[in-house]
Amino acid sequence: MKKIQKLLQNDHWIMPFLRQQKSGLFWSIFLNFMTTFAAGALMFVSGFLISRSAQHPENILIIYVPIVLTRAFGIARPVFRYAQRLVSHNWVLRIVSKTRRRLYESVASTAGSIRGRMQTGDILSLLADDLDRLQNLYLRTLFPLGAGIMLYIFVSIGFGVVNWQFMLWWFFILAVILIVIPLLSLKWNYNGVRRQKALQNQLYTEATDAILGLQDWVLSGRQADLVSRQGKVMSELANVKNKSMKFGWWRDFLIQMLVLLLTITTLIWAGNQFANDRDLVNYIAAFTLAIFPLVDSFVGVNQGVSEASVYEDSMTRLNQLPAVKKIESAPIPKNTVVKFDKVTFAYADKTIIDHLDLTITSGEKIALLGRSGAGKTTILKLLAGDINPNQGEVTIGGQPVSQLQPKMSELVAVLDQQAYLFDSTILNNVRMGNIHASDDAVAEAIKQAGLQPLIDALPEGYHTQMREAGARFSGGEQQRFALARILLQAAPIVVLDEPTVSLDPKTEHDVLTQIFSVLQDRTIIWVTHHLTGIENVDKVYFLEAGKFVLSGKPSLLRDESERFKQLLLMDQY
Ligand SMILES: Nc1ncnc2c1ncn2[C@@H]1O[C@H](COP(=O)(O)OP(=O)(O)OP(=O)(O)O)[C@@H](O)[C@H]1O
């Protein structure tokens, strides 16, 4: 409980919105209270009316007031309920939309760093479940608890006016329903609910893994293993849920028994209290019937409280998310000179880039070489501003890349090993490079990427569906579609991250030639292990131990550098 209190104090997700929307909160709780009050009063007055009518009153006017009150409370209850629904839904939807937007902004703006700390399954769980759970903490647990306690005090005082001993009894039973059982169910259900959440997260992670690696499972003939792995987690999850449900049934059964006890004792008490008086006897049914709507409003609190450990987990995770980075966006620079100025970058204590200097002029084409793990991708991430140098600075046109981040897609386009193509038409897929491009502009980009013969051979031409992940086309064709996207994107700097690695030598050569010919007026930074097509670049940089140990024009290096000659020789095997 202390943990939850501490979490609520440190919650910077929902609390700030609650403070902003105080009046909605007040009206929501007040109308909740009034709905239950009207329901209780309706039963109370109806009980009295039925009893009094059974005494055959001599004149209708004698029961006129209870009749009017029954009508009034009968109308008031649905009216209050409707108003409460309107106010609370309006209030909840506002909070949901604001917090959800903030969550997406937080995940998007810090995607690079989040990916380092969380698995995809965790992120999915965060996006899919955590915010809903946090709303539930407030809506299903804390607010009903607040309204319930208000009602509890109100009713107890009401009884106290008639009989203080019976008030204590009511106080005791309701305290058991509203405080003792929720606390016990929190304690007993704590581990089960936590386990349920952990398994749900595991399921997300494993499902992500299974989908991303589906081809490898199938190729290795281990589909059955995949299904049984998922099946194990699912059946454990089902077991845990089952136990939790059974626990809930027993808990609700206990509460119903307590309500029964309360009803019987109220009946006996009211019988003793009022039976001897012809007028007061009518209150026996009134008090007894009024119990049901009141107790109904308390019962839901238990379910909410018993899930508090899930809320705790979701809340911790949400509050640990980095704050949304508000970046002052610098204007797009006129020139696009890329400069790494004595840049050092380390993952934990492992230095990857060490006081690196690099200048790439506008329109220059360079190749970054180096062994696997040398830090080539790290250089690209530093360029895109996804990670920040520990020392030194990366600039484009003199502006630090951290300030250019919101406009990065206007400056830098990326063609990597496997561009993602969506299950939509060719036109739609290529238009992703620039959603404002006309059909003619898209067709021109497709033509420049060397795809016209392919399109002409397709019965549906530009409107051919690509199927999931572009499965309709070969690897080389997919890369050409991605190239067409980049042509539309019109960013002055293009990063090529081994775009031809999975292609056969002939296709690799053709695609590279196409790329360098259509992107001749743009800056190209090409990360590669292969030296095929290396003559297309102006300068080669070889990265080792965080520094460039070799750099220069490929034609010169071919003559002068023994190391480069060795690399060329190795590449032929
Ligand atoms: N998020 C990370 N946390 C810790 N270490 C990392 C992280 N990302 C990369 N590294 C390490 O940094 C080093 C450089 O990685 P990088 O991906 O830049 O290499 P690379 O030259 O692009 O390799 P490859 O050619 O195999 O793609 C590697 O040793 C890698 O293990």
Image (spheres, rainbow, N blue to C red):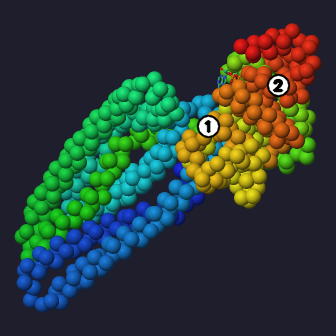
Asked if residue 77 is positioned above or below residue 518 in the image, the reply reads: below
Which residue corresponds to the image point at 36% horizontal and 45% vertical from the top-left? 305
Q: Quadrant of residue 386?
A: top right
Disc 1 under 8 Å from ligand 1? The reply is no
Asked which secondary structure carries label 1, the reply is loop
**Quadrant observed for ligand 1 in the rendered image:** top right
Name the residue at 60% across, 41% down.
Answer: 473
Residue at 67% across / 32% down in the picture? 417
The Cα atoms of the two marked residues, 2 and 1, are separated by 24 Å
- Residue 550 on image: x %, y %: 86, 16
Q: With 183 as the anchor, is 262 left or right in this view?
A: left
Instruction: Tell me residue 174's x, y (percent).
Output: 26, 52
Q: Quadrant of the C terminus?
A: top right
Residue 458 in the figure: left or right of residue 242: right
Q: To which residue does mark 2 refer?
A: 534
Dividing the picture into quadrants, the one containing residue 436 is: bottom right
* Nearest to viewer (mark 2 / mark 1): 1
Amino acid carrying mark 2 in the image: Ile
Q: Earlier in the sequence, mark 2 or mark 1?
A: 1
Q: Which residue in the structure is indicated by mark 1?
A: 474
Relative horizontal placement of residue 556, taking residue 513 as reference (left or right):
right
How many numbered marks are there?
2
- From the viewer's side, name the closer residue of 465 and 13: 465
Residue at x 36% of width, y 48% of height: 304
Q: How many neighbours does mark 1 have within 10 angstroms: few (below 14), some (14-19), or many (20 or more)?
A: few
Q: Position of residue 313 (x, y in %)?
A: 46, 37
In the image, 473 versus 300, the foreground residue is 473
Q: State left or right for residue 308 relative to residue 383.
A: left
Screen quadrant of the N terminus = top left
**38, above or below 128, in the image:** below
Q: Position of residue 28 (x, y in %)?
A: 44, 64
Q: Amino acid at mark 1?
A: Ser
